[in-house]
C-alpha cells in the first residue's frame, strides 16, 4: 500500500490503481464537485502546480471531458475522454487518454469513481483506474499506475480545499 495523502493500492500486474479518500461533506455536495463544470475546473485532473489552460465537462453519458494543463515551463498535457456512466450521486465512469506531443497518445485508462455515504456529512470516494493501453510511458504500466495513485492523491487534496 502506498500513501499519497489518500489510501492507495496498486496492482501493476493488471494495471489497476485503487485510491480511497474520506471527505467530511455530504455525498451530494461531493458529487456536484465532480459533475458541475465550473466547480470541477478548479480541482479536477491536474497535478499540484499545474495551470489549467482549457477545461470542458459535459457530465452525461456520452459527454466529453477535456483538460489541457501545463506545469511551469513544461509542455501542455492534453487529456480527453468520454463519460460512460453517471448514476447520481453514487458513480461516475469515464475513459480518458492523454497526449503529451501532437498526435501521440501514450496511454488510455478506464476510471470509475464511486461515492459512498458513510453518514449525513461523510463521504468515501473510491477511484479505480484500469490502464487499457500504454504506448510510450517511461517505466511502462508500473510507472503509470503509480502516477495515477499519486495524481489522484493530489487531486483529492485539491478537492478537499475546494470543499471548504
Image (cartoon, rainbow, N blue to C red):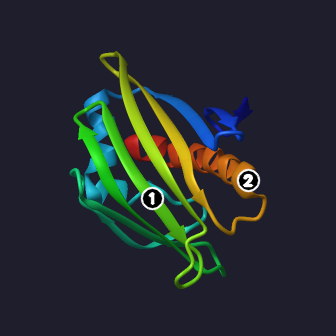
User: In the figure, 143 relative to 25: above or below?
Assistant: below
The residues tagged by marks 2 and 1 sit, at their Cα atoms, a distance apart of 17 Å
Residue designated by label 2: 143
Name the N-terminal-most of marks 2 and 1: 1
Numbered badge on residue 131: none
Quarter of the image with the C terminus in it: top left
Say few, some or many: other residues with alpha carbon within 10 Å of mark 1 (under 14 / 14 to 19 / 20 or more): some
Regarding mark 2 in the picture, which secondary structure is present there?
helix
Left or right side of 38 for 73: right
What residue appears at the point 70 percent right and 65 percent down from the top-left corner? 137
Considering depth in this image, is 53 or 136 the residue closer to the camera?
136
Quadrant position of residue 92: top left
Residue 152 or residue 133, whichever sits in front: 133
Please give the residue where the numbered disc 1 appears in the rendered image. Answer: 96
* Quadrant (top left/top right/bottom left/bottom right) for the N terminus: top right
Q: Which residue is found at the position 46% from the left and 45% from the top?
A: 111
Q: Is residue 98 left or right of residue 80?
A: right
Residue 20 vs 56, above or below: the answer is above
138 sits to left or right of 49: right
When the figure is inspected, residue 151 is found, relative to residue 98, above or below; the finding is: above
Taking the spot 41% from the left edge, 47% from the top edge, the residue there is 162
Q: Residue furthest right?
A: 139
Q: Are marks 2 and 1 in contact (CB under 8 Å)?
A: no
Task: Give the secondary structure at mark 1.
Answer: strand
User: Badge 2: how crowded within 10 Å, few (<14), some, or many (20+)?
Assistant: some
Residue 36 position within the rendered picture, expressed as x and y whole percent measured from the top left: 25, 52
User: Is residue 164 toward the left or the right of residue 9 in the image?
Assistant: left
Q: Where in the figure is residue 140, as x and y percent of width and height?
A: 73, 57
The total of numbered circles placed on residues is: 2
Amino acid at each position: 500500500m502506498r500513501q499519497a495523502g489518500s489510501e492507495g493500492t496498486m496492482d501493476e500486474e493488471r494495471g489497476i490503481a485503487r485510491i480511497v479518500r474520506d471527505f467530511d461533506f455530504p455525498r451530494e455536495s461531493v458529487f456536484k464537485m465532480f459533475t458541475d463544470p465550473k466547480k470541477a475546473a478548479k480541482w479536477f485532473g491536474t497535478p499540484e502546480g499545474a495551470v489549467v489552460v482549457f477545461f470542458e465537462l459535459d457530465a452525461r453519458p456520452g459527454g466529453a471531458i477535456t483538460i489541457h494543463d501545463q506545469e511551469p515551463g513544461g509542455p501542455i498535457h492534453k487529456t480527453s475522454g468520454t463519460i460512460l456512466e453517471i448514476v447520481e450521486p453514487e458513480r461516475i465512469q469515464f475513459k480518458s487518454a492523454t497526449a503529451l506531443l501532437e498526435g501521440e497518445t501514450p496511454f488510455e485508462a478506464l476510471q470509475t469513481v464511486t461515492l459512498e455515504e458513510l453518514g449525513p456529512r461523510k463521504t468515501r470516494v473510491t477511484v479505480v483506474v484500469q490502464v487499457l493501453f500504454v504506448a510510450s510511458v517511461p517505466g511502462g504500466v508500473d510507472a503509470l499506475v503509480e502516477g495515477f495513485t499519486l495524481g489522484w492523491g493530489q487531486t483529492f487534496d485539491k478537492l478537499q480545499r475546494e470543499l471548504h
